[in-house]
Amino acid sequence: MSKVVMVARLWLAVAMAVFSSAFVNGHVTLGWLSTRSEFLTQEEFWFDQTLDHFSHYNRHKFQQRYFEFLDYFRIPDGPIFFRICGEGPCNGIANDYLSILAKKFGAAIVSLEHRYYGKSSPFKSLTTNNLRYLSSKQALFDLAVFRQYYQDSLNLKLDRKSENPWFVFGVSYSGALSAWFQLKFPHLTCGSLASSAVVLAVFNFTDFDQQIGESAGPACKAALQETNQLVEQRFAINKEEVQALFGAEEMEVDGDFFYFLADAAAMAFQYGNPDKLCCPLVEAKNAGKDLVDAYAKYVKNYFLGSFGSNVRTYIQKHLKNTTLGEDSADRLWWFQVCTEVAYFQVAPANDSIRSSKVDIRYHLDLCKNVFGEGLYPDVDTTNIYYGGTKIAGSKIVFTNGSQDPWRHASKQIPSPDMPSYLLTCRNCGHGTDLRGCPQSPPNIEGDAHSCTSPATVYKVRQQLVKKMDLWLSECQASINRKYV
């Protein structure tokens, strides 16, 4: 894009803010804000990124994809909201609550795709050896280098030498990256939102399953446990028939099938749709109907249907596929799991929802089978490097949904300059503060009206805005002193 076009777009964004009129850009995929659009923009830009930030000799580069949304940007000194993409393709800038924040603060939004994921892969073949540059540490340096590149490019286009105040956002793994970026590069940002941020690497993650039981409630929990027992009994007699009932005929490893069934239940609570699972199961149990059939219908109609999951995600033969493709994210995330963070969602010894076959040995065998000998999740080193839930950062807002099983890998206890808020409602799950309720499918502008307690979400959002206003103001004052 030429400098003339870029500057024109920036000034048109200002004009739109001043006159409150709609601006439709000539690029059909770029950021004109439809009230019904899932994305603010899907126009792609590219940046030459360093492959290995820790080598003095390897200076290879790869193309990394990013997006920008400028419609609300207050030129020249408006803040830049840096949305971090996580463990999957980044296909644009989502139109969630961040768009409301951008309009309020006059901010630009930029978003960088995580290395290896989507269209930002350094290699066409994803062999274990080629994945050696896939880590959170490399990803953090990607963010830092890109941040400097984008700021320098913006200054060049606006013919100035100042800085804009930056604020970082992320959800889940990218929420952890958001917190870690603020921890490791505090001079590059004014603050961070770490939404459902999994900052604690966990080897034996039994709390995940236990939270599913708490979120389900007594009746639904009992129905889930009975369903699992019935599935195991029938599986022992005729595994092919049981797998076919769930549309999982392709699965060859028993543990894969039981992990798939456990995840199907977890997603209902993680993404704010508990009634999709609990209502039909409890009704079937109370009516004396076949619980396995009821659960199979939920799995096929919701989990594999409207939710959009895929059986292949859970098949180790698929995870071993090294050819770069649309569903390579499954293999890539498991590599990060098997080397850095684990998050092994194993069955607790007592009162488990999931099958006891989903244990530590299952996970370690998967890592070995998919990636070969020698890989092991060094969670102690990860937690020493970042601090886990004892992260010693500042100006980080942590948020978690009360029903989200991942909150037990997040920082839930506030500390000085790092508030932590729990959004408590029956369908408050993963990233509720940005996504609203339910968390899937997407809610335009993060609409929270469907949360069972919208007031809880609004209150946490008000606290977030207060912190952002304070930290951005402090940052701007520091910038003004530096460039006076």
Image (spheres, grey):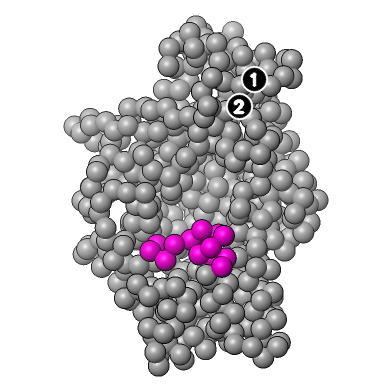
Residue 32's disc is 2
Residue drawn at x 59%, y 8% as measured from the top left: 484
Residues at badges 2 and 1 in contact (C-beta under 8 Å)?
yes
Q: Nearer the viewer, residue 449 or 415?
A: 449
Residue 23's tag is 1
Q: Position of residue 370 (x, y in %)?
A: 27, 63
Q: Does the magenta-highlighted stretch encompass residue 7?
A: no
Upstream in sequence: badge 2 or badge 1? 1
Quarter residue 128 falls in: bottom left
Mark yes or no: residue 338 visible: yes
Q: Residue at x 56, y 56 (%)?
A: 410
Residue at coordinates 41% horizontally, 85% vertically from top-left? 241
Magenta extent: 301-313
Res 153 quadrant in image: top left
In the displayed structure, 85 sits above or below 271; it is above
Amino acid at dot 1: Phe
Residue 422 visible to the viewer:
no
